[in-house]
Image (cartoon, helix red, strand yellow):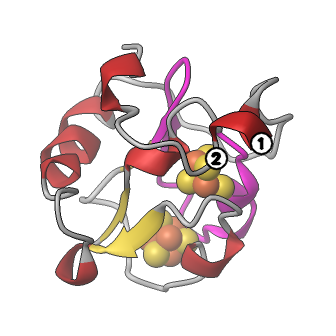
Amino acid sequence: TFVVTENCIKCKYTDCVDVCPVDCFHEGPNFLVIDPDECIDCTLCEPECPAHAIYSEDELPEGQEQFIQLNAELSKIWPSISEVKEALPDADEWNGKPDKLQYLER
Ligand code: SF4
Ligand code: F3S
């Protein structure tokens, strides 16, 4: 399973959803998640993210482990997204900023 991690928060570029063959991305106000029950590990989304926020759950950077649970939980609540839309207005400014989990909107 692939996991969307912290650097997606406040960026939400959505390039990832364009390539997913099983449409398993789900959208919240300022973050996207992957439904772990639907992801087929095709790896296509990982290189598409301008924020480098997508990882295999086996290769998560240190400190990002909690995003496994967040993707599982929020993908059951948030609606599916399969078409690219505009990134959030200040996406480029927030790309790479640390400690963005505190800004996650549900
Ligand atoms: Fe979709 Fe493939 Fe990414 Fe899983 S690895 S979320 S199936 S694009
Ligand atoms: Fe987020 Fe990257 Fe997709 S910023 S919306 S995981 S392209």
Q: Can you give x and y, in whole percent of width and height, for residue 13 in the image?
A: 72, 45
Question: Alpha-carbon distance for marks 2 and 1?
Answer: 5 Å
The residue under label 1 is which amino acid type?
Answer: Asp
Q: Nearer the viewer, residue 84 or 65?
A: 65
Q: Is residue 69 above or below residue 42?
A: above
Q: Which mark is residue 95?
A: 2
Q: Are marks 2 and 1 in contact (CB under 8 Å)?
A: yes
Tell me the magenta residue range.
12-32
Which image quarter holds the C terminus? top left
Residue 73 part of the magenta segment: no
Residue 24 part of the magenta segment: yes
- Apparent side of residue 81 relative to residue 3 in the rendered image (left or right): right
The residue under label 2 is which amino acid type?
Answer: Asn
Disc 2 residue lies near ligand 2 with CB under 8 A: yes
Image point 24% across, 59% down: which residue?
A: 37
Disc 1 residue lies near ligand 2 with CB under 8 A: no
Image point 59% across, 72% down: which residue?
A: 45
Q: Residues within 10 Å of mark 1 (few under 14, many from 20)?
A: some
- Apparent side of residue 55 relative to residue 24 in the rendered image (left or right): left
Q: Which residue is mark 1?
A: 92
Quarter of the image for residue 29 reads top right
Which image quarter holds the N terminus? bottom left
Quarter of the image for residue 61 reads bottom left
Quarter of the image for residue 68 reads bottom left
